[in-house]
Amino acid sequence: MYGPLCVGLAHWRGYVTADTEEGQQLISRGLSEWTMPLRDGPISTLHVDLLTHPLPRLRLMRKGQQVDLSSFLTGPGGKRFVPTQEGKRLLYSDLALGEDTPTLELCGQELCILRPDLWLFYVEHLLTWQMLTESSIAALHAAVCAVDGVALVIIGPSGSGKSTLCWALAQEGADYFSDECAFFDVMTHHLYVRSHQARLRPGGVALLDAPPESVDWQETKPGDPKIAAPFSAPQNPCPEERSLLLFVQGFAERPCLTPLRGGEAARQITCLMGFGDPSPMARMETAADIVSHIPCLALTIGPPRETAQMLLAYAGSL
């Protein structure tokens, strides 16, 4: 076993380690945005076993006890995993990959990765699940840009135009951070991000005045081609204490920004939030607490450049 890597976000810390030097190097490169200095000792370690079994396995130790990873498949975000029984084997396909072929097998308390090329992908997702279950952090499916010391947290499902709008915002001078997740500490309401490369769909690219020059289209999901958007590195850190929650309501000929009632904002957040406590009441209370501390606006997206200019003008007026 090679030296563990300390990863974390906000006040959460954890270890991740592999049993081969090559595996540990891949973890160090792939999780570079997660790497954190060790403050207090992490309470859990995610082990990647690449030598012991024919296929990669993930096991999680917490306070000296092995964690049953079946809860990862059924807990926060678990709706994406579809179980199938093959004899005594319990297999899972992943809706996030857009295919029915099983990619995971539950082996006792461990996860077996049926596609070895995906083990680092599932390490990242399992680490996010660890963080949510071990800390007071909520994850929102959102894109994050920032301007004038204000973080623009654009909340909406896949295909709602978040990535396209981020590209337009960046072209107008905003810093880009992620089009995947925004993380809020529910105790302090501070915002945290991990860098994530944006990928644009053909429909979004067609709307841009200055689209990316790359033509390297790739399909993570079958029939869903995307192009990598080469954003410049942000000029400033992401603001932690000043955020706007922008809830995408759809598209129109002209952009529109209006206040959103707290109850409706909380309802929408509940549908798009990952949180360690899966109970409906805990999720609703957390969503209500977030929207009571952070301004919420309904955003109708018009032409991307015009929408970006509207958002930047609004942020600059605060």
Image (cartoon, helix red, strand yellow):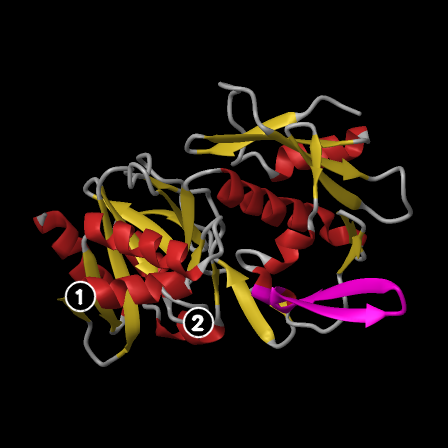
**Is residue 216 among what the camera can see?**
no
Residue sitting at 24 percent across and 80 percent down?
A: 252
The correct choice, above or below, for 4 with respect to 174 in the image is above
The correct choice, above or below, for 153 with respect to 92 in the image is above
> What residue is pinned by disc 2?
159
At which x and y percent is residue 67?
68, 41
Classify 10 Å Cα crowding around label 1: few (below 14), some (14-19), many (20 and above).
few
Q: Of residues 164 and 239, which is closer to you in this image?
A: 239
Quick one: label 2 or label 1, which is nearer the N terminus?
A: 2
At which x and y percent is residue 64?
69, 28
Report how far apart the C-alphas of labels 2 and 1 lie in the structure.
24 Å
> What residue is pinned by disc 1?
261
Dominant SS type (magenta): strand
Asked whether, in this view, residue 165 is left or right of residue 112, the answer is: left
At which x and y percent is residue 124?
61, 45
The correct choice, above or below, for 161 with respect to 233 in the image is below
Asked whether, in this view, residue 48 is left or right of residue 160, the answer is: right
Residue sitting at 60 percent across and 49 percent down?
A: 125
Quadrant assignment, res 136:
top left
**Is residue 55 among what the camera can see?**
yes
Which quadrant is home to the N terminus? Answer: top right
At which x and y percent is residue 248?
30, 68
Amino acid at pointer 1: Arg
The segment highlighted magenta reads 79-96
Q: Does the magenta stretch include residue 81?
A: yes
Which of the two marks, 2 or 1, is nearer to us in this view? Answer: 1
The answer to whether mark 2 and mark 1 are in CB contact below 8 A is: no
Residue sitting at 57 percent across and 42 percent down?
A: 130
